[in-house]
Amino acid sequence: MRINICGVKIDQYSFDEVVKCIIEYAISNKEPEYVVTPNAQHILTLQKDTRFQEIYRQALLVVPDGVSLLWAAKFLQTPLKGRVNGTDLFEQLCAIAAEKDLKIFLLGGRPGAAEKAKEILQLKHPNLKVVGTHCPPYGFESKPKELALINSKIREAKPHILFVGLGAPKQEYWISSNYQELRVPISIGIGVSFELVANMVKRAPTLMQKSGLEWLFRLLVEPERLWKRYIVGNPLFIWLVLRQKIGLSKFE
């Protein structure tokens, strides 16, 4: 079952249920699928980006990455089962992949982030099979040779799970354009997770994560990059939810 937050349909699964579903699908080697992990910024982008909307409609799973979505769902009296944080999901899937002999590939992140994340994850899980990493150059999406190189690397590596850290909506655009050709069972866009696991970007203290203030910590750490997303975006998201609640906007 999916609930509606500002026109975006989000799965009512717990973190553990999402992990179980992804692992089972990766093992099954069925037709390729992908998972999206919305936060408040995604909701805002989806209001006007029809391509992004279609990508969301075709996703295998739409799981709530942002705490703001949990608050919104509760306010709208359609509560979710909990947050499915992208970085936690990445780390947990890698831990289980090591146990289940599943192969993973890391695409994206800042230079060196995927390689460093790989090192750290393999120290924790020596059996983890990271069959490739690749950090594409800026503007790669308009360079046919680079796009062909990326696809070639992934097809040759034959991972069960492809983690893509290119930021939204670029990572979702890329996944949607390539997942069928790549034939990877599951692809997941996970934003800045490689950097967080690699300790290139500091993660909020656990207390701030649990209290829903991770956004404030990230804003303090990277104000120049994130001020617009949070200072402008958060009030806009709240306004959209209020409009849905009082019936001013009919989100289908």
Image (tube, helix red, strand yellow):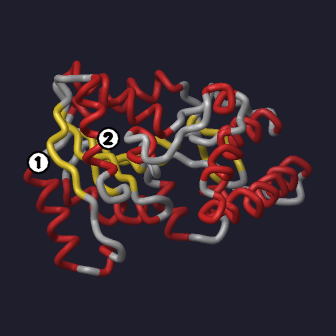
Look at mark 2 in the image and give the residue it sits on. 117
Gap between marks 2 and 1 measured at Cα = 18 Å
Q: In the rendered image of this protein, does residue 244 appear above or below residue 210?
A: below
Q: Is residue 169 left or right of residue 149?
A: right
Q: Please rate how many residues cluster around mark 1, counting C-alpha atoms within 10 Å: few if below 14, some from 14 to 19, many from 20.
A: some
Up/down of 117 relative to 137, above or below: above
Residue 168 % position (x, y) = 50, 60
Badge nearest the viewer, 2 or 1: 2
Quarter of the image where one finds residue 103:
top left
Q: Choose top left, top right, bottom left or bottom right for residue 161.
A: top left
Q: x and y percent of residue 158 in the render?
A: 13, 46
- Residue under the point 23% across and 30% down: 122
Q: Label 1 sits on what residue type?
A: Ala
Q: Secondary structure at mark 1?
A: helix
At a point 54% along the width and 38% down the height, the residue shown is 203
Give the x, y percent position of residue 16. 47, 21
The residue at which mark 1 appears reads as 157
Residue at x-position 64% and y-position 71%: 48
